[in-house]
Amino acid sequence: MADARGISRRHMGLGAVALGGGLAFASLPADPAAAAAPSRGDGRPALRHGSAREAGLLPGPLKQLVADAEAFLQPSPRHPWYAGAVLLAGRGRTVALHKPIGMAVRYQAYDEETDTGVEFPPDRQIPMAEDTVFDLASVSKLFTSILAVQQIERGRIELEAPVASYLPDFGRAGKQDVTIRHLLTHTSGFRAWIPLYTAPTYEEKVQRVYDEALAGPPGTAYLYSDLNLISLQLVLEHVTGRRLDVLLHEEITEPLGMRRTRYNPPASWKPKIAATEDARRPWSGLDRGLVWGEVHDENAYSLGGVAGHAGVFSDAWDLAVLARTLLDGGVCGRKRILRPESVELMFTDFNTAFPGDEHGLGFELYQHWYMGAMATPRTAGHTGFTGTALVLDPTTDSFLVVLGNSVHPVRSWRSGSAPRVAAANQLARAVPVRPARGRSAWFSGMASAATATLALPALDTSSGVARLSCALWWDTEPKADVLVLESSADGGTTWEPVPFTTRRPGGTAEAHPTGTATGWSGRVWHDLTAELPAAPGLVVRWRYTTDRLYVGRGAYVDGLRVEKGRRRLFDEARPADAARLRAEGWSRETG
């Protein structure tokens, strides 16, 4: 199912089709860490549980991550966002947080007249566990994308080749120019979704995809569509002669030891699977009752549970193994599923023509609406309609898994992506920023809809040229959240921006003529200089302003100094001067 955003996305050979065949999977292993953590070449596990400190993370924000997630078990604002969730956060090879909260199975039905959930008796409810398996919904698209990139590596698919060169019937209705890249980046022109489940046979469903006309010319707009990955599934099955579920097992899950990741989990798994929706019309396209152990998405269900856009079930540890594999350039232990250059393509924006809709091959990039403060131009991830999300940040080598059953008991109870954002913000906050020059630095905070100011005392800059210098670090939501250097010559009644120049290590000078900094700066310290206006009582301050939606990692200032010739008017390194700084919303942080 196309993942509902609610608000805007801000607010590179051939075979025969094989439709038969099946797979036998072992039962769920008892210990996820022991069973699903593949060994590296040196014999140590690719992933291990450990403390926040061992992961190079701050423990406080991880504790807050759990507290924030638990708050969404309560009305938020009217209904719980999910009945339960499994949270996993790590950095490097250490999983520092793996926490189940709430219930995997709570409701047996939804009462539309009273807008309430009908609960199972307490003895039939099932709490979340670390190894609870979830219907990943659209996070399944990542697996299809990885399988496609593998075939690109092997020369069976070409990234810029027309889809119709593999599937001639696909070229109907003006789709002859749609390429594999268009499918992977959601720029084909397909509309978001069509009810394939209304077609009576598998063959007729495929024909509907072939007959579907485009909403616009390929490559001219970004439009997220399940049909892109369904089409990619058809290409993969054609060029490999294997079904998608077989490909998933043979090419990804078996090499990586992901024993709880598959399509169509067997009935024996049901007690370990999180329930989803009481699926009935009119809110669902099909009358199925409580969906539990079967794929929730109607189209995927009608395709036999195996679909390019949805249908993969997995747990948090398996997804962490996948995340670690990709962050390590496609290798896990002695097993390689992708070349490093292929992973690089998956994390490279192909949608530069569509700002705000950054997209690699299969992966979404730089999306604050669910990545929160983890979002950078290289942060990659995906969400799923059932309440799932995976976020990978190569910059800090960190990863986040949030698996919730947010359509349990009904899809209308969830709205927006607040729990994902909250979790991502706290993991980003847990990655320390080391001060540039001393033991601590000024930090703007990460509050939304806030203004924080850091002001120097009034200084006499009336004779000669006074220069301000400091170290500056910033990462904000582009354009929406802004850091401003400004001055006042009338005691704070009016303020004017102060242009400044920054230089990152090994880089060239960058001018900021409007006195502002916003967006991505590489998460490194920059040296800043600024010429100050002449005034007998000049007040200079940093002002950081955020909007109400999303935030970045914030801003840091260190080593503030004002000099006029050889005379030092202000030096933060002097205790007396430091005491004269006025901070509202800013705080000292040691990192």
Image (cartoon, helix red, strand yellow):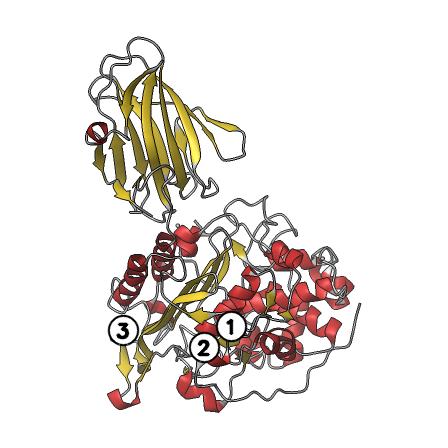
Q: Position of residue 118 (x, y in %)?
A: 27, 82
Left or right, 584 with reference to 519: left
Q: Position of residue 345 (x, y in %)?
A: 63, 54
Is label 1 in a helix, a strand or a loop? loop
Q: Position of residue 562 (x, y in %)?
A: 32, 22
| Residue 64 visible in the snapshot | yes
Viewer-closest of 402 and 352 = 402
Residue receiving disc 2: 33
Residue receiving disc 1: 45
Residue shown at the point (40%, 42%) measured from the top left: 476
Is label 2 in a helix, a strand or a loop? helix
Q: Quadrant of residue 126?
A: bottom left
Q: Quadrant of residue 206?
A: bottom right
Left or right, 177 with reference to 435: right
Marks 2 and 1: in contact by CB < 8 Å?
A: yes
Q: Give the residue type at disc 3.
A: Asp
Q: CA distance from mark 1 to mark 2?
A: 9 Å
| Residue 211 visible in the snapshot | no
Residue receiving disc 3: 115
Q: Give the residue type at disc 2.
A: Ala
